[in-house]
Amino acid sequence: MATRNIKHGNDFFKYLEKSNPEISIEITYWDLWIAILLKKQFDNKWDDLINHLYNNHSYYDRVNFESMVAHINYLRDVLFRNNLNSIDILSGVDDDLFKKQGIKD
């Protein structure tokens, strides 16, 4: 029987490194999924993603919503502080993953 390799949001995905070897950012699957969502639905516009979440969340799911927006803002800040963006997370990602997500270059 084949076993599935299930990935959870906080699982390590990859290190994102710049030409400066001292800059190495740990990217999780949450970060990957955010980058995919930004590319696929929001033309890589962080504010559009956050505004969409603000306008479409349930009052009863406020805690999860606030945590999600906090993580998105944190990721954006870390990337921008290091002159990176969400596209950098997607560099080197397997083409099959993009196909499964419906993303075409």
Image: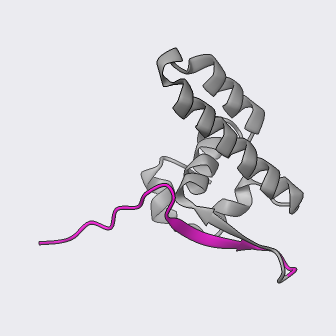
Q: Residue 64 at x, y = what percent?
A: 53, 33
| Residue in view at x 47 percent, y 49 percent | 101
Quick check: 33 left or right of 73?
left
The residue at the far front in this view is 63
Work out whether residue 39 or residue 83 is closer to the camera in this orientation and state it.
83
Work out whether residue 83 or residue 60 is closer to the camera in this orientation and state it.
60
Quick check: 12 left or right of 45?
left
| Residue in view at x 60 percent, y 38 percent | 67
Q: How many marks?
A: 0
In this rendering, the answer to whether 53 lies above or below 39 is above
The span shown in magenta is 1-20
Work out whether residue 84 or residue 69 is closer to the camera in this orientation and state it.
69
User: Residue 31 lies in what quarter of the image?
Assistant: bottom right
Q: Residue 73 at x, y = what percent?
A: 74, 42
User: Residue 28 lies in what quarter of the image?
Assistant: bottom right
Q: Quadrant of the C terminus?
A: bottom right
| Residue in view at x 62 percent, y 27 percent | 53
Quick check: 65 left or right of 45?
left
Secondary structure, magenta segment, majority class: loop
User: Residue 22 lies in what quarter of the image?
Assistant: bottom right
Residue 10 falls inside the magenta stretch: yes
Q: Residue 66 at x, y = what percent?
A: 62, 32
